[in-house]
Image: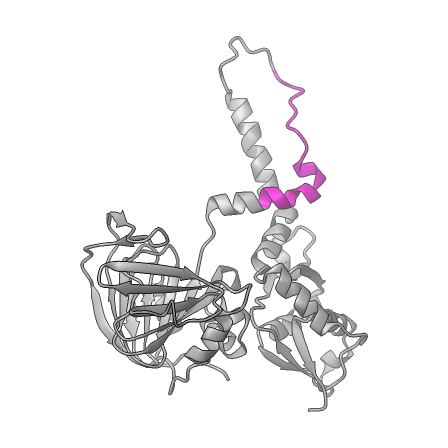
Amino acid sequence: MSYQLINFDRAEFMRKYWQKKPAVFRQVFDQFSDPLDEHELADLAMEQDIDSRIVSRDGDKWAVHEGPFCEFDSVCQHHWSLLVQSVDHHHTSADALLRAFCFVPNWRIDNLMVSFSVAGAGVGAHIDQYDVFIIQGKGSRRWQVGLPGDYPPYSPHPSLSLIDGFEPVIDEELHPGDMVYIPPGHPHQGQSSSDCLNYSVGFRGPTGKELLTSFSEETEQYNWFTERISDPTRQCQPLADEISQQDISELRKKFHTMIDSDQFLLWFGQHSARRLEDWMLEELEEDGRTDDKIVPPDSLLIRQPGIHPIFIPANAFSDRIARVFVEDVSFNVPDAECELVREFLNAPQFTINSKKSHQNSLFFNRFVATLVNRGFWHQHSSL
């Protein structure tokens, strides 16, 4: 199954709406078909390593139950919603839906959250700090979206942080194939008019704290990042309480040296490419392991759900060599191979054509064989 956005100008959207204002887009998919149903979603919610929860409301009383679930009758009471995170990591058609939003780069992807709600259900008015496209699947849902402001939070349940009293600038009913875009910091709430499925495609920018924490953890492999600051040219200082301009300049230079280095780019590429949990990587590698050194001609290669490759061009590095990052694997890409490699990385399905020159590329075949061997792509011969 594939999904293509229609009635939607990507360039205009980025210029006019992205992180600027919310909007509703009607019928952005041609005859939208749900990538999964509520029964398949419930099956995922029973899995041990998948993040899921059920939020329910009975009047002013809220309840939240965390998955995995062994049964649903006791927790699916009153007005309830089942929410499952990172469905794109586990379901091929859900992954295909997320890929329709490839006009935003892979490194900004958060995940695809899927929810099923009975009539009258919702999770309350709240504010998120990420960009989200919410696609209406089966059924219908009323969405209200407001503008950023000072909205005191309240917690009707320890696991819920809600707000009250925002003035909606959007108040519309969505039907299958419709979509609402909500930028960070905008209050919003949805209430289902009938049993319905919703697909939330989230894009989250990392915080400075998250980046610094990850960078400090990874830089241990680069010895010169762990060297202490030295100052053999330090002058006599009359009073000990001052951090001098020279000290400040040297400290800033130390940080700039790290940020401007190739090691910084290598870390950020690997940091951005890691999307799957360790247990998923282990399972993929076990499933994909093969003794094949070269992928046979005319093989159909299908990318696994949840894989989002990262490419950094050669001109970003001091050695002028491009890099590709796929989960925990990285590759140096020769100039002559960049176009082919990027064509491969951006195609969910790719056929190695024996009639094309790339069949004779030793680098490309080894590159593809590594990805197949790790389970990141599936190999299908005998087309």
Nearer to us in this view, 249 or 61: 61
Nearer to us in this view, 28 or 87: 87
Location of residue 370 by image quarter: bottom right
Location of residue 168 by image quarter: bottom left
Q: In the picture shown, does residue 56 fall above or below 362?
A: above
Where's residue 17, x and y in %? 32, 64
Q: Residue furthest bottom?
A: 383
223 drawn magenta: yes
Which residue appears at 47% of the width and 63% of the height?
A: 67
User: Viewed as shown, does residue 363 lie left or right of 102?
Assistant: right
Where's residue 276, x and y in %? 58, 63
Q: In the picture shown, does residue 208 fall above or below 126?
A: above
Q: How many marks?
A: 0
Q: In the picture shown, does residue 355 fall above or below 270?
A: below
Quadrant of the image containing the C terminus: bottom right
Residue 372 seen: no
Where's residue 192, x and y in %? 28, 73
Where's residue 173, x and y in %? 24, 75
Task: Please give the range of residues in magenta.
Answer: 215-234
Residue 56 seen: yes
Location of residue 60 by image quarter: bottom left
User: Viewed as shown, does residue 73 lie left or right of 96?
Assistant: left
Q: Residue furthest front?
A: 74
Nearer to us in this view, 84 or 34: 84
50 drawn magenta: no
